[in-house]
Image (cartoon, grey):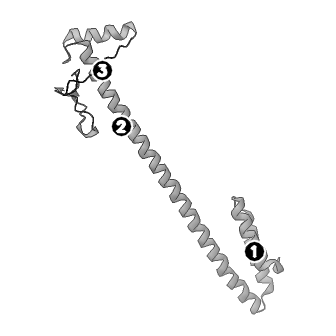
Amino acid sequence: MARDSSWDTDLPSSYDVNKLYTQSADPKGHSDVLHVRVKPWIGSKIAELIASRQLDYKTIQEFVRDALVHRLHYWHEQKALKDVASILCHIYTMQDYLEEEQRRAEHEQIINDMTAVINNHLASGGRDEAKRIVRDMRDNALGIPNEYWRNRYLKIIEERFGHLL
């Protein structure tokens, strides 16, 4: 891993998962002091890693600073992913509503078209056929799961064709 000479990680674009973030201060010399307690096995494992010289850390503090920076960026990315997921969820929900409204508009157009069909049957003496079609339309409307739209379509059918039911 490349050693980083500064804390230039304020912007997500400057972050590199392969860098070691070991500096204790920013380029202007600013730093905060944190004191943490860890379980004994964590402290001994970190000490073993440092002593083994298998990694590029010189001190436990460097290891901890690097771990903190990487974990902070991990959580930053997770929040960004959640924000994107939330936005996508909102977009998909709105698309679902629009598609549902479009289907309802198409359904209302079909009812209007069926009104013309029924009126044609009535005009040509096919009252029984017109009644059969209206009963089928009502039966289909009864199967609509959404109560608002079911009642709305039943009301339209009753208003237009109640005399045929």
Q: Earlier in the sequence, mark 2 or mark 3?
A: 3
Give the amino acid at mark 3.
Asp
Nearer to us: label 1 or label 2 = 2
Residue 88 position (above or below residue 134) = above
Q: How busy is the neighbourhood of tag 1: few (under 14 within 10 Å), some, or many (20 plus)?
A: many
For residue 143, side relative to residue 94 (left or right): right
Image quarter where the C terminus lies is: bottom right
Residues under labels 1 and 2: Cα distance? Answer: 54 Å
Q: Which residue, given by chain and number where applicable, does mark 2 sit on?
A: 77
Residue 99 sits in which quadrant?
Answer: bottom right
For residue 104, side relative to residue 29 (left or right): right
Image quarter where the N terminus lies is: top left
Q: Earlier in the sequence, mark 1 or mark 2?
A: 2
Which dot marks residue 99?
none
Q: Which residue, given by chain and number where applicable, does mark 3 sit on?
A: 32
Residue 75 position (above or below residue 84) = above
SS at badge 3: loop
Residue placed most toward the observer, 16 or 24: 24
